[in-house]
Amino acid sequence: MLLSTNFKKLVAVRSRMAYEFILNLLPNPQVPPKPEIELMFLTMTGTKHLPFLQQCLFSLYTSWSSIPKLQIVSDGTITISKHDWASSSSR
């Protein structure tokens, strides 16, 4: 039982690393603009989780007909000057 639990934890940690590696290899999709709605999407993130945030936002974009305004709260590891979302999402 203990071996099974340790193995699951090991796989979970390694899966995250593989997922991050694959995300860094894939190009960001080009998407047309959508209308905005008067709703605020508030999220918290740090530098380590930016690729995951990009995937979350892309999922939101593909599943909603209109997009909400975005408010990102940093854990202190990112700033707008470090990460320009407009240029990083268009690569």
Image: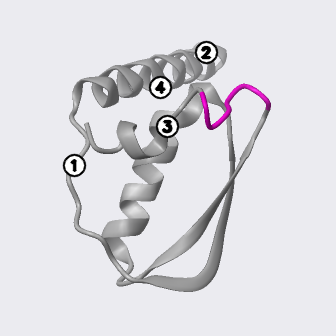
At horizontal 38% and vertical 37% (from top left) the residue drawn is 88
Q: Nearer the viewer, residue 46 or 15?
A: 46
Q: Position of residue 74 (x, y in %)?
A: 74, 40
Q: Decide which of tag 3 and tag 2 comes sooner along the chain.
A: 2
Which residue was labeled with disc 3? 84
Q: Secondary structure at mark 1?
A: loop
Q: Which mark is residue 29?
A: 1
79 is within the stretch colored magenta:
yes
Q: Quadrant of the N terminus?
A: top right
Amino acid type of the residue tagged 1 in the rendering: Pro
Give neighbour class at mark 1: few <14, some 14-19, many 20+ (Cα, 10 Å).
few
In the rendered view, would you say 71 is above or below 11? below
Q: Decide which of tag 4 and tag 1 comes sooner along the chain.
A: 4
Q: Position of residue 10 (x, y in %)?
A: 53, 15
Q: What's the CA distance linking mark 4 and mark 1?
A: 21 Å
Q: Nearer the viewer, mark 3 or mark 2?
A: 3
Q: What's the CA distance linking mark 3 and mark 2?
A: 39 Å
Q: Quadrant of the C terminus?
A: top left
Q: Which residues are magenta?
A: 76-81
Q: Decide which of tag 2 and tag 4 comes sooner along the chain.
A: 2
